[in-house]
Amino acid sequence: MTALTKYDRLEAAGLWRAAPDRQRVDVIVSIGDATLTIKDMRDQALAHWSLAAIARANPGKRPALFHPEGDPSETLEIAADEDEMIRSIEKLRRAVERARPRKGRLRGVLTFGVLAAGLAAAAVFLPGALVDHALRVVPDVKRAEIGNALLSEMQRATGVPCDNASAQAALIELTQRLSTDDAPTYLAVMRAGVRGAIHMPGGVILISRTLVEDHESPEVVAGYVIAEQTRRAASDPLRHLLQSAGSFATLRLLTTSRMPLVSINDHAKQLLTEPPTPLEIEPLLARFAALAVPSAPYGYAVDLTGELTLPLIEGDPVAGDAARAIMPDASWVRLQTICEG
């Protein structure tokens, strides 16, 4: 009780009643090391109350009326003018109360711990769960709408897609040649800002004009399209958008069927600047084989020396006679003019 020593031997007059049916007695009250001592006028001790177990029957009122905690039948009344004693007892009571273990404190600590753990788990797992749910429920028409919104935003950097009328039929030929029933593809040739090719939600793949203008045959542009199809099959482009946009944007898509414009803007910039995701060679070669497109021309286009893309060159699944024409030469020549005019 060292915290109580500053009140050692503080005394005051009071009225003490041992029981409700007993007379009140004039007493002298003093504070000791650990007890409040009650004495009669002959200095004989009548009672000792533990300082850690004193309760007040009339908080905030004068004269102050105290009793041992749990036993209101024994009372001690201290006159209003004994202000120092009353304030000292109250201060000691508050100090003891603060130090006393609270009922339910452990429960509160445990509850807080559980909630904190739950929030931490939610921070880790909830975003992923939201994205997974969105990928299951967002319809193809909404994916196409999101892809178109991204394309519209990209046009600030890329310009509008090339649309020479005489070459549109050739672009449709290439699109149909590289599409499959389970993975339809919609191609757009961009004037600037696109390095190689970029895939987006809704099946849209943007290709750089250099892929059709700077190569003698369509195998190179076909290879870039196949690579983007392989990336799309490995990871849903809508997942990429939602993971970049965050949980708020995902919730908004689920609740309002709309993506925040700022999320569309940010992701459009991201798609134009981020490097392409590395690809596993086996699924990439499998898709070249399924579409009967040679992989070696694409390998040399990515790395002129062929050193970094040797598996694509040496492992070409449709080299030579196994290859199937991607499009007629006349159509390819027309496609190369799509950005003219």
Image (cartoon, grey):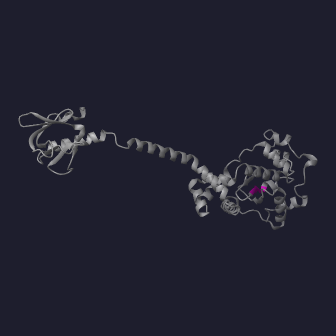
Q: Farthest residue to the front: give it.
A: 21
Q: Per the image, is 208 magenta? A: yes
Is residue 260 visible in this depiction of the protein?
no
**Where residue 325 appears, x then y in whole percent?**
90, 54
In the figure, is residue 314 to the left or right of 233? right
Q: Quadrant of the N terminus?
A: top left
Where residue 230 appears, as percent x and y from the top left, is 76, 49
SS majority, magenta:
strand
Give the quadrant of residue 189. Answer: bottom right
Percent position of residue 271, x then y: 67, 53
Image quadrant in which you'd find residue 47: top left
* Residue lying furthest left: 42
Above or below, 74 relative to 149: above
- Residue at image coords 9%, 40%: 27
Looking at the image, which residue is at 84% across and 65% down? 169
Closer to the camera in the image, 284 or 109? 109
Find residue 294 and report its horizontal and vertical position in percent.
86, 48
Given residues 211 and 267, the one toward you in this image is 267
Residue 127 appears in view: yes
Residue 331 occupies which quadrant of the picture?
bottom right
Q: Is residue 117 magenta?
A: no
Looking at the image, the residue that sits furthest to the right is 321
Magenta span of residues: 205-209
Relative horizontal placement of residue 267, taking residue 3 as reference (left or right): right
